[in-house]
Amino acid sequence: MRFPSAQDWQRGLDDCEKCLSIDPKFVKAYIRKGKIQHFLKQYHKALSTYDVALEIEPGNAEVLEAKRATMFAIQTTDSDPERAKQAMQGEQHTQTTGGTR
């Protein structure tokens, strides 16, 4: 079994960007981009990506679940407690407002 290389992940991000350049409201591309960023431990980038998706589809369950998983990863790995706190406040804001900022 071959594991994806860094080049494969970059290709995945490039594909997402290409899709979004064609259709900036293609939520599935934001989901995939966010999941790749999460896997690469770019958690705060993933959160930003999910926030854009939630602006397009505020109640999208897949985006909300992916964002929760990223928030959990930040809480358990972020060495900067203030950044983790800010990220959690953003999650609470999204839950109470339905994704609008």
Image: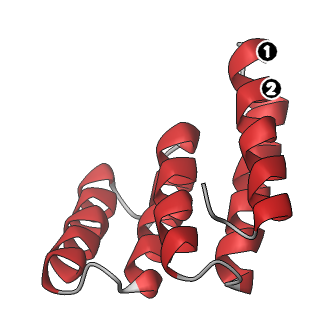
Comparing marks 1 and 2, which lies closer to the viewer? 2
The secondary structure type at the circle numbered 1 is helix
CB contact under 8 Å: marks 1 and 2: yes
| Percent of width and height locating residue 81 | 79, 15
> What distance separates the C-alpha of mark 1 from that of mark 2?
6 Å
Q: In the shown orientation, is residue 67 left or right of residue 55?
A: right
Q: Which mark is residue 81?
A: 1
Q: Residue at x 60, y 54 (%)?
A: 101
| Crowding at mark 2 (Cα within 10 Å: few <14, some 14-19, many 20+) | some
Circle 2 residue: 85
The secondary structure type at the circle numbered 2 is helix
Q: Is residue 79 visible?
A: no
Q: Residue at x 34, y 60 (%)?
A: 9
| Percent of width and height locating residue 32 | 46, 74
| Percent of width and height locating residue 54 | 58, 71
Q: Which amino acid, mark 1? A: Pro
Q: Residue at x 71, y 36 (%)?
A: 87
